[in-house]
Image (tube, helix red, strand yellow):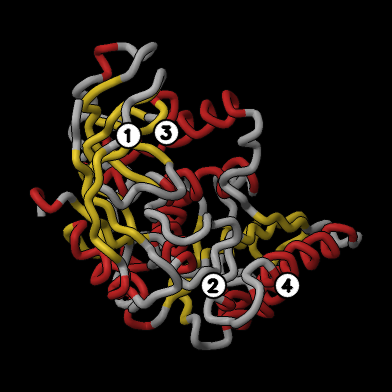
Amino acid sequence: MSVIATEIVLPDRVEPDGLLVTRRPLPALGPGQAVVAVAASGVSFAEQQMRRGKYYDQPPFPFVPGYDLVGTVLAVGAGVEADMVGRRVAALTKIGGWSSHAVLDAADLVAVPNGLAADAAETFVVNGITAWQMLFRVAKARTGQTVLVHGANGGVGSTLVQLARSKGIQVIGTSSARHAEAVRALGATWVDYRGDVGQQVRALAPGGVDAVFDHIGGPGIADSFALLAPGGTLVSYGTASTKDDEGNSRLPVLRLLVRLLVWNALPNKRTAHFFNLWAGKRDLPRFRARIAEDLSAVFDLAARGVLRAQIGARVPLSEAGRAMRLAESRTVVGKVVLVADTES
């Protein structure tokens, strides 16, 4: 099969308008691979960091960004069941998702349920896996507990809130005032992140919260840890507060890791974790099985209407620069989704 793919290339450290729209033939299919016609991909915080050269382990420029995708299998290589052709699938890619077509390992593809639209499913791929694993595999949150979600209006944050509420977990969610009603509509108690967050949270949970999910990092991570109840868990999964800092992109993460290690060494009965979605990939079969299990669980909840897709905007793939700028504006609730130009 000869396919010319449209790709969005990140050529260097550029402003969103500096993204390039290119076309190239897809490479030949190898054994165990599949061609996927991409219907939707997302704009996550990872791509926002990548365009600044600040993502922890991004590849050298130039490359095609795109952390995840949803599409339909067009063709398969040797060793792949022929009946995969025509199936709707999702994949976690880290890079390469901002393309009209992608060649992927068939073992990395997860079935998308019937009735779940591509753009809706897309909002639950990296966001859903991240939220599910942090909430249930790391924090081991349980019915009746109370958790704090920073950035509850964002892609991961809004998914965290919904997953927690679906299991009877109380949620305090931070955001700006413009997103207060959206956060409340998800089922969280809203807290203004521009105010004294600590004071507001303590008024709601005097004994502390059972878990905090913090993508902000920086000095404020200490405030998140201080809000934990005895036995509570801090899950750090980003350093958004340092995205515009100059210097080595690895230093903010390394400083954060050192701080978490120090806290875990103290006899304070509270724990701190840095969540890395790709941890454990060296054991590839187990990693793939865990991704498929967790994403399938999230998709099932979405297909049954328990989770509602939070689509901030749908933007054609060829206008990825506009999508990036919109995602970085912090004016949307949920995720900005890139859709195939023919479907926009």
Give yes or no for contact between labels 3 and 4 (Cβ–Cβ under 8 Å): no
Q: Residues within 10 Å of mark 3 (few under 14, many from 20)?
A: some
Foreground residue among 114 and 314: 314
**Residue 148 image offset from top left, x and y in percent:** 56, 64
Label whose residue precedes the other's in the sequence (1 or 2): 1
Residue for badge 3: 297
**Residue 137 image offset from top left, x and y in percent:** 61, 41
Q: Residues within 10 Å of mark 2 (few under 14, many from 20)?
A: some
Occupied quadrant, residue 156: bottom left
Label whose residue precedes the other's in the sequence (3 or 4): 4
* The disc label shown at residue 27, or none: 1
Q: Give me the residue at 30% from left, 47% from top.
A: 122
Q: Along the horizontal axis of the image, is 89 left or right of 213?
A: left
For label 2, the SS is helix
Foreground residue among 292 and 190: 292
Up-down relation of residue 241 to residue 137 (above or below): below
Q: Residues within 10 Å of mark 1 (few under 14, many from 20)?
A: some
Marks 3 and 1, how far apart at CA: 33 Å
Marks 1 and 2, how far apart at CA: 36 Å
Label whose residue precedes the other's in the sequence (3 or 2): 2
Q: Residues within 10 Å of mark 4 (few under 14, many from 20)?
A: some
Q: Amino acid at mark 3?
A: Ala
For label 3, the SS is helix
**Residue depth check, mark 1 versus mark 4: number of the one nearer the observer:** 1
**Residue 23 image offset from top left, x and y in percent:** 22, 50
**Residue depth check, mark 4 versus mark 2: number of the one nearer the observer:** 2
Marks 3 and 2, how far apart at CA: 28 Å
Residue for badge 2: 240
